Image (spheres, helix red, strand yellow):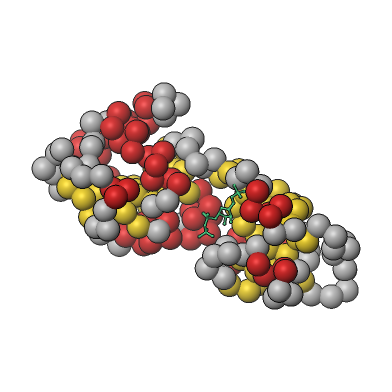
Amino acid sequence: MITIALTKGRILKDTLPLLAAADIVPEENIAESRKLVFSTNHDDVQLLVLRGIDVLTYIRYGAADLGVVGKDMLMEDGGDELYELHDLAIARCRLMTARQTQQVERSAQSRLKVATKYVNIAQRFYAEKGIQADIIKLYGGMELAPIMNLADEIVDIVDTGKTLVANGLEPVDFIADISSRLVVNKASMKVKYDQLKSLTDLIASAVGDN
Ligand code: PRP
């Protein structure tokens, strides 16, 4: 059995055509189901639908062989147990810092409060800039934090930029370009090499066609 862990939400929508190009088609409509595991048109391939950060955990422990996950998650919580195989060029966005539009510049004296779900990325980014920052972990809705004075800045992904504008924020620093990646468990790649190699080659060759 090959188990593929998919990231739910906007990544999932763009992943299904790539899987279809590799002739992997779920047996029911994932978008309309509350199930978390799906059989496919192949008896030996199943799909899991998870949050990105959990996709990495399933692959790390070998509970999934293969997965599709945002580069942001890999930057935050990558690891030695998995290989990043291909850039799938889907769900493109940018990882940015942002702050309130009318706010004055960063003060060199005081510590900055930064709200984010990307704690490790934020710690690295501000440390490299020599800025003393206290990182506050949130799980979503980061844009609210500056409005409510919980934080001075946020680190979050920006796609259209509409969420920032709607909450009176503006992007400040570019951290990284983000897109979804095909990731494999290292041990699975050894044990199931032939199956996984042909499957991942087919997915990779569909990139850019969809
Ligand atoms: C993401 C991100 C921003 C928004 C950016 O949230 O956290 O809030 O999308 O998109 P935009 O630039 O096009 O407005 P998402 O909707 O994925 O939900 P989340 O807060 O659960 O991460």
Residue 129 placement, left or right of 163: right
Residue 170 placement, left or right of 205: right
Residue 11 vs residue 144, the one in the foreground:
144
Q: Position of residue 123 (x, y in %)?
A: 65, 66
Q: Position of residue 68 (x, y in %)?
A: 38, 46
| Quarter location, residue 102 | bottom right
Q: Position of residue 130 (x, y in %)?
A: 78, 64
Residue 125 placement, left or right of 11: right
Residue 87 vs residue 210, the one in the foreground:
210
Question: If the image is split into quadrants, where does the C terminus sit?
Answer: top left
Residue 45 vs residue 20, the one in the foreground:
20
Residue 121 vs residue 91, the one in the foreground:
91
Q: Confirm whether residue 133 shows in the render.
A: no
Vertical order, 155 against 67 (above or below): below
In this view, the residue farthest toward the top is 209
Residue 31 placement, left or right of 99: left
Picture residue at 53% right of the left edge, 52% below the top: 72
Q: Confirm whether residue 24 shows in the render.
A: yes
Q: Position of residue 16 (x, y in %)?
A: 33, 38
